[in-house]
């Protein structure tokens, strides 16, 4: 099992253009969950990580280049995540390899990534015409970004979260202001995050301050969304909770973690920044 210093992150890399499954690197989920005091056998959420890869190309049986968009749906119960740069390098390795069909490419990705993460996954490959018909993000609920709120610091602080007085309600709050940092390269990651809940009314201003407090916080995309789920659950105690992050792409790949304790996966709807 790879440690972070064994991955391609932050290193100069050779771009192999012949199919090479060995390029994939796993990162254990347990490392981050231990810090959240979670047990992998009894997670307070279910969910998926949706990966969209926009730079997939291979050769068909006649040697003609094909281009497509790949969608990988990885269960949050997998032992590992895939280190994102390693997935980019792996998908680039398809470029000068012949595959007889789209189905053969899907089968290869499913087999190789399942071996890396330690769990089965779903893989779709969309032609560009098919990808154009995929849904786009539509705003539902309250965007907290327009609130006239002052900020005194940018240090991660879950204590900023609180609920308002009032009866239980079902609500949706979202923000386009989420920023965090890669724990290896310290590069910034940008995202839209949606919180859907049923419970005591979550203060919109408190959620905005909390989101902004993550501005210099380090974590992989999946870890940041799980941190948010746990913080909101512990501070606001909603009966039902979903946290869904839509991160902007890096290296031709965007990652979109979905965590919930009551609903199934929401549509893979691309935001304006993706």
Image: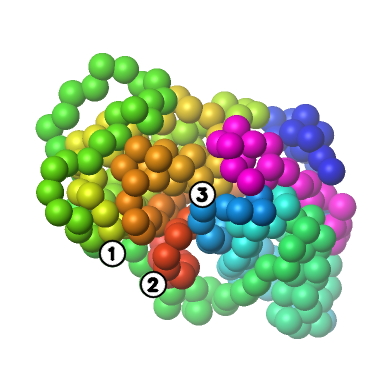
Left or right of 34 in this view: 258: left
Is the C terminus in the top left, top right, bottom left or bottom right quadrant? Answer: bottom left
Is disc 2 surrounded by few (<14), some (14 to 19) or many (20+) residues within 10 Å?
few
Which residue shows up at 58% across the image and 37% down it? 37
Q: Residue at x 24, y 22 (%)?
A: 151
Give the x, y percent position of residue 115.
82, 60
Q: Is residue 6 left or right of residue 271?
A: right
| Distance from Cα at disc 1 to Cα at disc 3 | 19 Å
Residue that mark 3 sits on: 249
Whether residue 123 is in magenta: the answer is no
- Near mark 1 (Cα within 10 A), the count class, few <14, some 14-19 or many ≥20, is few
**x%, y% of residue 51?**
58, 59
- N-terminal label among 1 and 3: 1
Kindly state the secondary structure of the residue where label 3 is placed. loop
Q: Which residues are magenta?
A: 18-39
Q: Look at the numbered disc 2 and give the secondary structure of its residue.
A: loop
Which labelled disc corresponds to residue 135? 2
- Label 1 sits on a secondary structure element that is loop
Q: Residue at x 62, y 62 (%)?
A: 75
Q: Position of residue 120 (x, y in %)?
A: 73, 68
Q: Is disc 3 surrounded by few (<14), some (14 to 19) or many (20+) residues within 10 Å?
A: some
What label does residue 244 carry, if any? none
Name the residue carrying label 1. Answer: 138
Q: Position of residue 137 (x, y in %)?
A: 34, 63
Disc 1 + disc 2, Cβ < 8 Å? yes
User: Is 59 above or below relative to 186?
Assistant: below
Q: Which one is nearer the viewer's eye here, 245 or 210? A: 210
Q: Badges 3 and 2: C-beta atoms under 8 Å apart?
A: no
What quarter of the picture does the N terminus occupy?
Answer: top right
């Amino acid at each position: 099992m790879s440690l972070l210093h064994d991955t391609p992150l932050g290193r100069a890399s050779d771009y192999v253009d012949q199919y090479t499954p060995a390029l994939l690197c796993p990162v254990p989920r347990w490392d981050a969950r231990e810090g959240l005091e979670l047990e992998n056998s009894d997670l307070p959420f279910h969910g998926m990580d949706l990966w969209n890869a926009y730079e997939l190309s291979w050769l068909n049986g006649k040697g003609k280049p094909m281009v497509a968009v790949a969608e990988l749906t990885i269960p949050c119960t997998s032992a590992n995540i895939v280190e994102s740069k390693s997935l980019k390098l792996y998908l680039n390795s398809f470029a000068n390899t012949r595959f007889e069909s789209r189905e053969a490419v899907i089968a290869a990705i499913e087999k190789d990534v399942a071996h890396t993460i330690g769990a089965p996954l779903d893989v779709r490959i969309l032609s560009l015409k098919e990808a154009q018909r995929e849904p786009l993000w539509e705003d539902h609920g309250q965007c907290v970004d327009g609130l006239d709120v002052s900020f005194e610091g940018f240090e991660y602080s879950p204590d900023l979260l609180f609920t308002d007085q009032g009866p239980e309600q079902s609500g949706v709050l979202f923000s386009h202001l989420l920023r965090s940092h890669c724990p290896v390269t310290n590069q910034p990651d940008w995202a839209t995050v949606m919180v859907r809940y049923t419970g005591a009314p979550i203060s919109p201003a408190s959620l905005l301050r909390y989101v902004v407090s993550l501005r210099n916080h380090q974590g992989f995309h999946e870890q940041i969304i799980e941190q948010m789920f746990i913080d909101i659950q512990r501070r606001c105690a909603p009966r039902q909770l979903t946290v869904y992050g839509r991160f902007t792409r890096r290296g031709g790949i965007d990652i979109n973690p979905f965590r919930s304790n009551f609903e199934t996966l929401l549509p893979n709807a691309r935001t304006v920044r993706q």
